[in-house]
Image (cartoon, rainbow, N blue to C red):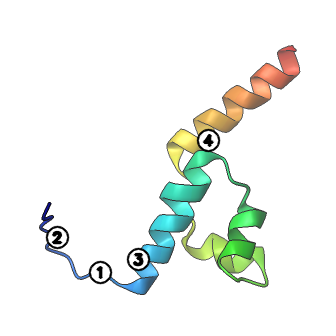
């Protein structure tokens, strides 16, 4: 199967995609993502690991379930 990608891909883009789409969007804590990427400070990870709307919604749903019981 061939995929036509018109954008030049970079190592940085791959790391960003991994951090946001693969890990954070699937509930992996930012601390774990930071460690996986080899960052010494979480603030380094936060620079390009944007918070996804779907992740915010999922976190609030989980919090609601915990509070309700």
Q: Give the residue at x 75% y 64%.
A: 32
Q: Is residue 64 above or below residue 68?
A: below
Mark 2 to mark 1 CA distance (whole Å): 9 Å
Res. 9 image quadrant:
bottom left
- Residue designated by label 2: 5
Left or right: 49 in relation to 33: left
Mark 4 to mark 1 CA distance (whole Å): 28 Å
Residue 56 is marked as 4
Are there few (<14), some (14-19), or many (20+) residues within 10 Å of tag 3?
few
Label 4 near label 2: C-beta < 8 Å? no
Q: Is residue 30 above or below residue 37?
A: above
Residue 54, image x and y in percent? 52, 40
Residue 23, image x and y in percent? 59, 57
Label 3 near label 2: C-beta < 8 Å? no
Label 1 near label 2: C-beta < 8 Å? yes
Mark 4 vs mark 1: which is more N-terminal? 1
Residue 66, image x and y in percent? 84, 24
Are there few (<14), some (14-19), or many (20+) residues within 10 Å of tag 4?
few
Residue 9 is marked as 1
Mark 3 to mark 1 CA distance (whole Å): 6 Å
Q: Nearer the viewer, mark 2 or mark 4?
A: 2
Q: Give the residue at x 59% y 43%.
A: 55
| Quarter containing the C terminus | top right
- Looking at this view, is 53 or 65 the one in front? 65
Which structural element holds mark 1?
loop
- Residue designated by label 3: 13
Are there few (<14), some (14-19), or many (20+) residues within 10 Å of tag 2?
few
Q: How many marks?
A: 4
């Amino acid at each position: 199967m061939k995929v036509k990608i018109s954008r030049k891909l970079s190592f940085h883009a791959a790391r960003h995609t991994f951090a946001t789409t693969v890990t954070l969007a699937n509930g992996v804590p930012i601390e774990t993502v930071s460690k996986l990427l080899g960052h010494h400070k979480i603030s380094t990870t936060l620079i390009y690991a944007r918070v996804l709307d779907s992740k915010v919604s999922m976190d609030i749903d989980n919090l609601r379930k915990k509070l309700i019981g």
